[in-house]
Every structure is written in C-alpha cells, then in structure tokens.
Amino acid sequence: MLAVCQSSEYWGSYEAAAKVIESMAMQHNALGRIFKDGLYEGAKRIGEIKGINVMKYALYGKGGVPGVTDARTNPSWAVAMAVSSRGADHLKCAFATVERFNRPDLSLKHFGRPEAAEFGTPTLKGMDCARSENRCALVNCLGVCEFLPTTDTILYPVSLFAEALSVSCGRALTGEAIEGAGERTVNLEKAFNSRLGLRREDDKLSERWLNEPQVDRPASPLLGDYLESVNDEYYEAHGWDKATSLPTRGKLEELGLHSVAEVLARDGAIARRGVL
C-alpha cells in the first residue's frame, strides 16, 4: 500500500497518505475512528458531526468504494457497482461485460441481439451484468486469472475449462456440468447478504454518479434516469424478485440449493412470491 501511495501524481504527499491509512488501521486518532469502516460510513459520521450533507461528495456503490473508475461511463459497469455482493467492485463482473470491450459478436452469442455492446446505452446491460457475474464467479472458482477468460467467452468456452479440469482431477466433466457452479456461487453470496438484511434499496449508487452529468458527454442521459430499470433487468435475469431483490425458492431449487432455500425461508429472507 505504501508503494502505491508514493505516486505524487495521485496523492501529493505519500507520507500523509500513509499516516491516514495507519490511523484507519490502528484507530489511534479521531480521523482513524471516523473512517474505520470505510468512506461510506465515514462520510455519514462527518455529516452527523457537522450537521451537513457530506454524502453528496462521496463516491460509492452499495456502501463500497470503487477504484478509479467512473460508473457513469458504462451502464453495465454502473449496475455492477450498485449490486455487487461486496460493494462497488470491478472484479466481481463489470470489466467482463461486452459493452466495455465493444463486442457485438458476444452480444449476439448470448442474447441473439447486438445491443448489449452499444456503448453508453442501457439496453441489455442488466442482463449482461448478470451473465458476466455468473461467468466471473465460475472463473474464480477455477482459480485462474479472470481477465481474458471472462471477457471473451468465444475464445475461452466453458468446454475448455471442463477439459482442463477433467485432466487435472481425473474425473470426466463437461461444460454443462461446471457451468452452473458460477451461478450457484452468485446465489449463495446473494443468500448470505439477504440473511444480513440487505434488500433492493441497498443496491444504490452515490448522488454524484446518479445526478451529475459527465463533463465530456453533457448530453448523455443521467445515470439516475435509467439505473432502476437496468436493475430490474438484472434481477429478472438472475431469477430474483424485482420488488425486494430477494432470491426466489424456484431459482434456488433449480440450482440444487434446496437447503439454502429452507434457511432463507426460516429467516424471512426469501421472496414471498415469484419474479415480478
């Protein structure tokens, strides 16, 4: 972390940045205690202390802080930042979407239409985010680098992974046999968060991303104008309830996660109806 902080281009004073990081880890001063749970909670605490709205200056998605990427540039990236199980995180799926790499061939392969590759439009972006999320989870389960295997599903078909896995473990596996692993992983993460009380209203982005136009593209529609509709498409693609974002019993049982469905039902963390 200190090596990253040494770039004056971003920080100005890496010594000061290192001290801030240390204070957050050790919590030996007021600044560290304010930001001990990250920027989102820290901004709320400053707002409470000062009695002003500090959240309008913060950049976040689902309470998490992204890297250096602006969510407004790509609708598929934006929905991924809003719904990621661990908060705004490009490694969950967003960089694997066909929009970011302008791949109409992949859009045709997965959806029978090229529009998912259109830069800056909301069309098919929720569906592609859900697809990419499942794919990234599968690749992560395999323990290989996710950059190329997740971005190009034509060059890296699931059958390729199945062949390599069959050779390594001595058990014949097909692409169909392992393809569901990613989707089960995503649904398990969703189930975990649902038990913690997270619902659709938590799948949100910061005020600045939603309401501020982009300087280089001032005529582009505001992210806040279409994010909810893209989220709808995302939930529907995963087979979850659009009103609450909760998993449905039907989807969990389809994936063989019957015991998970029972636990969620016991804890009141499963959709009471089918997908809306």
Image: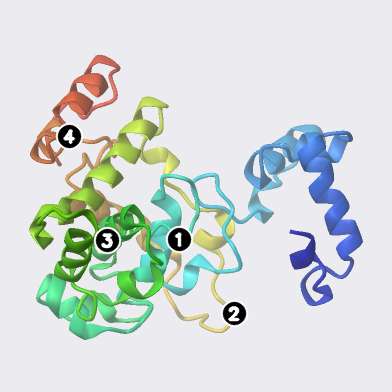
Front disc: 1 or 2: 1
Return the residue at label 3: 135
Q: Dot 2, how many residues are within 10 Å of its Cα: few (below 14), some (14-19), or many (20+)?
A: few
Q: Residue at x 35, y 70 (%)?
A: 96
Q: Amino acid at mark 2?
A: Val
Q: Dot 3, how many residues are within 10 Å of its Cα: few (below 14), some (14-19), or many (20+)?
A: many
Residue contact at pointers 3 and 2, CB within 8 angstroms: no
Q: Dot 1, how many residues are within 10 Å of its Cα: few (below 14), some (14-19), or many (20+)?
A: some
Residue contact at pointers 1 and 4, CB within 8 angstroms: no
Return the x and y of residue 246 as percentages of the image width and height. Answer: 27, 35
Quarter holding residue 121 = bottom left
Return the x and y of residue 92 as percentages of the image width and height. Answer: 41, 57
Marks 1/3: CA–CA distance? 12 Å
Return the residue at label 2: 215
Q: Amino acid at mark 1?
A: Leu
Quarter holding residue 193 = top left
Identify whether 95 is placed above or below 187: below
The reply, left or right, for residue 177 in relation to residue 238 is left
Front disc: 3 or 2: 3
Q: Amino acid at mark 4?
A: Thr
Identify whether 34 is placed above or below 134: above
The reply, left or right, for residue 73 in relation to residue 193 is right
Task: Choose the circle earlier in sequence order: 1 or 3.
Answer: 1
Residue contact at pointers 4 and 3, CB within 8 angstroms: no
Q: Which mark is residue 248?
A: 4
